[in-house]
Image: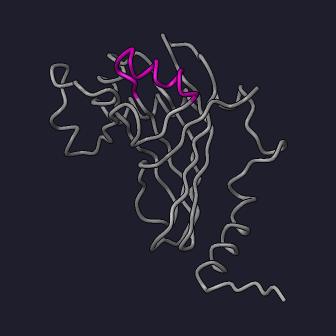
Amino acid sequence: MFKLNFNGAALAFALCTAAMAPALAPTAAQAATKADIDRDAKAALNNLYASNPTAKLIGSRAKAVLIFPSIVKAGLVFGGSYGEGELLVNGGVENYYNSFSGSWGLQAGVQSYSYAVFLMNDDALKYLHDSSGLEIGVGPNVVVVDQGVARNLSTSTLKDDAYAFIFSQSGLMAGVALEGTKISKIKQ
């Protein structure tokens, strides 16, 4: 006779994944429209530029900007995050993308945040197009800009492929990491 044997970690993973799936996977009724994404992305980018002069400086030099105005992250040991955004090239929307990540470890809570990735050169933009997306930590070198990094950036020190800013954090969960985040083009 075949018997299924779940250990505690496998059972916890299965229960958490099942409980969080509805919150992180948008249904047709929940999915943002292009107009919603456009409006929210513009507001988020303006908010970032108004509150962070370094982001505005980098934005003025970037070839393209991936902007995700609202990422929702939830977790209880196992977690995930999801949000939708757009790629801006020469000030216009080129395409729409989603951002997804999964994680495990000491975590509990729910939070939301925004982030922007500034693609600084043609190689980084080509990688995004050729790979049908981007995984933070694989491919172009992405520097997450915090207050310490921001103090040392100027137009003469911008040497990396991409710079990411996390902003507008709210909720009851500590910390945000972009490492391992998968950014994929939304199929239309």
Image coordinates for residue 91, horizontal then vertical, percent: 50, 13
On the rendered structure, is 182 left or right of 149?
right
The quarter of the displayed image where residue 32 is located: top right
Mostly what secondary structure, the magenta segment? helix
Count of numbered labels shown in the rendering: 0
Q: Nearer the viewer, residue 154 or 10?
A: 10
Q: For residue 119: magenta?
A: yes
Quarter where residue 138 is shown: top left
Residue found at the very far top of the displayed protein: 90
Q: 5 or 39: nearer the eye?
A: 5
At 59% from the left and 16% from the top, the residue drawn is 94
Q: Residue shown at 60%/35% (left/top)?
A: 184
| Residue drawn at 57 percent across, 42 percent down | 99
Please name whichever residue, 47 or 146, is drawn nearer the observer in this view of the structure: 146
Q: Position of residue 46 (x, y in %)?
A: 46, 28
Residue 122 against residue 162 in the figure, above or below: above
Q: Is residue 100 above or below residue 55?
A: below
Quadrant where the image shows the N terminus: bottom right
Q: Quadrant of the C terminus?
A: top right
Residue 100 sits inside the magenta stretch = no
The answer to whether residue 105 is above or below residue 51 is: below
What residue is rendered at 53% in x and 27% in y?
131
Residue 70 x/y as whole percent: 58, 43
Relative to residue 30, is residue 150 drawn left or right?
Answer: left
Would you say 86 lies left or right of 11 here? left
Q: Which residues are magenta?
A: 118-132
